[in-house]
Image: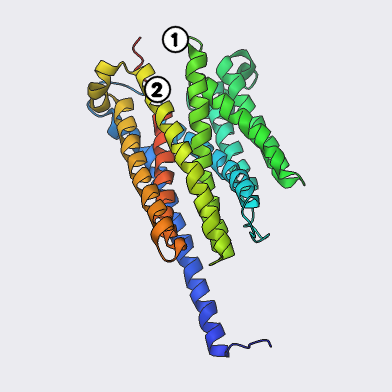
Amino acid sequence: MTSIRPAGEAAGNRGTARRAGTGGAVTLLVLVTLGALIPLLGPSAALHGTGESAAPGVGGIALLRAVLFAALCVPLGELFVRRLARAVPGAPAELPRSRAVWAAGAGFAAALGLASVVATGNLVPHGLGQIDVGGLYASRDGKLALLEVNAFAVAGLCALSGRPGTQVWPLAAVVAAEALRAHPATEHSPLAGSALTLVHVLCASLWTGGLLYALRTLRRWGADRAGAALLGLYARVAAVLLAVLTVTGVWSTLRRMPPETVPEQLTTTAYGRALLAKVLLVAAVGALALWARIRLSRAADPLAACSPARAEVVVLAVVLAVSGLLTALPVPIRW
């Protein structure tokens, strides 16, 4: 027998849904604004009193890098969690709508902006006439910038196709390009540094994007037992990702800062200050992840773990913004 809800109750539910949707949109707008302010205003705070000088337009470059990192996280996280969902017994077939196309568009725009900076000799262009597109083919950084632009374009086409899983290849090209860009050939053992960065960026993307899509999936599935199983499966993989992130992060830091100089550089250099902020944020994320794992295993309702997991997503978004800032600040390389 089909139950019919009273008209007042149905209207009340629709009103509640509208209010929840409006509240979510406002929250998202606030978070995006705060995330944009970190790379835009962060350079002046990080550089204050250090005696260092940053390249022109460092705030805009940091913002573009943060957008590029976020554009990597969304599709990689979706592919990752969809694969996990297939391993959950009795999981509903319905999954949240993919946002990979929008992410590819944002990544394409950010990569195009960064390529225009490279095309003007790492200066912010003030007009189209200053951009030397042909010059991009003459330098290593230019070729990597073009690779990222093209890779995001291809990723968007793959997301629109009938085989969205093929996105993994152009997205992997972006990760590799970022790893190579972060370690120029003049650096000591650049391939080792690029390998560390590649693993670090890949794990961070899977962790951040995966958690976001896992929470979206739980919201779609509701109080289904499969939702708790999916969150538990993600939590086990995330623990490994966090361990790898910690090892690669510490190793990369010691390559750029000799152990005896780390305490001093964390407070006296712009790069060190941004790195310290990122370390503290990641520690907060780790604490939230542990809290969510405890709730998942001990609470009467395993989905109670969603509350700290949502907070974890917010802090991870801030980490992405700080990471974008970190890539734009002068690196205190001391060999």
Looking at the image, is 113 positioned above or below residue 119?
Answer: below
Mark 2 burial class by Cα count in 10 Å: few <14, some 14-19, many 20+: some
Along the viewing direction, whichever of 10 and 213 lies nearer the viewer: 213
Mark 1 burial class by Cα count in 10 Å: few <14, some 14-19, many 20+: some
Q: Return the disc, 2 or 1, that comes first in the chain's sequence.
A: 1
The residue that label 2 is drawn on is 251
Residue 291 circle label: none
The image shows residue 309 at horizontal and vertical percentages of 43, 53
Residue shown at 43% from the left, 34% from the top: 243
Left or right: 1 as drawn, with respect to 284: right
Quadrant in the rendering for residue 267:
top left
Looking at the image, is 84 positioned above or below residue 205?
Answer: below
Left or right: 205 as drawn, with respect to 335: right
Residue shown at 71% from the left, 44% from the top: 164
Quick one: SS at disc 2?
Answer: helix
Q: How did the renderer colour the structure?
A: rainbow
Residue shown at 56% from the left, 22% from the top: 119
Q: Between tags 2 and 1, which lies in front? A: 2
Residue 188 circle label: 1
Is any part of residue 203 visible from this angle? yes
Q: Quadrant of the C terminus?
A: top left
Quick one: SS at disc 1?
Answer: loop
Q: Are marks 2 and 1 in contact (CB under 8 Å)?
A: no
Q: Quadrant of the N terminus?
A: bottom right
Q: Amino acid at mark 1?
A: His
Residue shown at 58% from the left, 60% from the top: 226
| Mark 2–mark 1 distance (CA, rounded to whole Å) | 14 Å
Q: Amino acid at mark 2?
A: Trp
Is any part of residue 57 visible from this angle? no
